[in-house]
Each structure stands twice: as structure tokens, then as C-alpha cells.
Amino acid sequence: MSKLYRLRLNDLTAPYGGASKTKGNNMRINECCLNDIKKREQKAQDIAEARKFFVGAMALLILFAIVGNMEYNDCINLGVC
């Protein structure tokens, strides 16, 4: 094997396309960063789900208030209780 071929092979197999002698350390850092990214994505997804639940609960509460008010007005104005 020629020296140039070995250099190119090392460049292709090292993380981020560059030759690196501390390959193991870079992989540990990458795994750590990936775990952080996954945690952030999970937290964002949980917040989005909680937001959907909150909006649904508020819509239901508003509907109950409207229907209750309509029933009260019918009882007062029309005498239908």
C-alpha cells in the first residue's frame, strides 16, 4: 500500500471525515451529545402533548360554560326549568 492510499483510507474511516488519533474520545462525546439531543426532543414532545391536552380541556370548559349559561337564560327568560 502506498502512503497516500493509507492517508486517504484513514481520512474516510475517522469521525467527521478527518484523520484522528483519539477516535474513541470523539465517539464518547458524540454519544453524549446524541443522548442530550434525544432528551431535548423527548421533552419538547412531552410539552407539545401537554399543550394539546390543556387546549382540549379549556375548549371543553368553555363549552360547558356556554351550555350552562344558555340553560340558565332559558330558565329565567322562558320559564323552562
Image: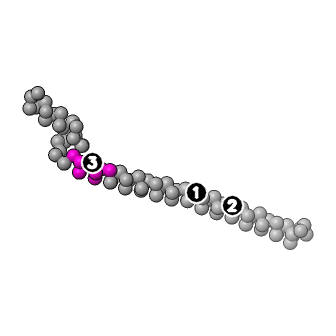
Q: Nearer the viewer, residue 6 or 40?
A: 6
Closer to the chain start, of discs 3 and 2, is 3
Marks 1 and 2, how far apart in space? 12 Å
Q: Is residue 30 magenta?
A: yes
Point out the frontmost of discs 3 and 1. Answer: 3
> Would residue 6 be found to the left or right of residue 44 on screen?
left
Q: Is residue 5 magenta?
A: no
Q: Amino acid at mark 3?
A: Met
Cβ–Cβ under 8 Å for marks 1 and 2: no
Question: Would you call the spot at circle 2 few (<14 residues within 10 Å), some (14-19), or many (20 or more)?
Answer: few
Q: Main secondary structure of the magenta part?
A: helix
Closer to the chain start, of discs 3 and 1, is 3
Q: Which residue is mark 2?
A: 60
Residue depicted at x 13% and y 33%:
6
Q: Quadrant location of the N terminus?
A: top left
Label of residue 10 in the image: none
SS label for mark 2: helix
Can you give x and y, in whole percent of width and height, for residue 31 in the image? 32, 50
Q: Which residue is mark 3?
A: 27
Q: Amino acid at mark 2?
A: Leu
SS label for mark 3: helix
Marks 3 and 1, how far apart in space? 37 Å
Q: Residue placed farthest to the right in the image?
A: 79
> Would residue 62 be found to the left or right of residue 21 on screen?
right
Q: Which residue is mark 1?
A: 52
Residue depicted at x 78% and y 66%:
68
Cβ–Cβ under 8 Å for marks 3 and 2: no
Marks 3 and 2, how far apart in space? 49 Å
Stretch in magenta: 23-31
What is the count of numbered marks?
3
Can you give x and y, in whole percent of width and height, for residue 53 in the image? 60, 58
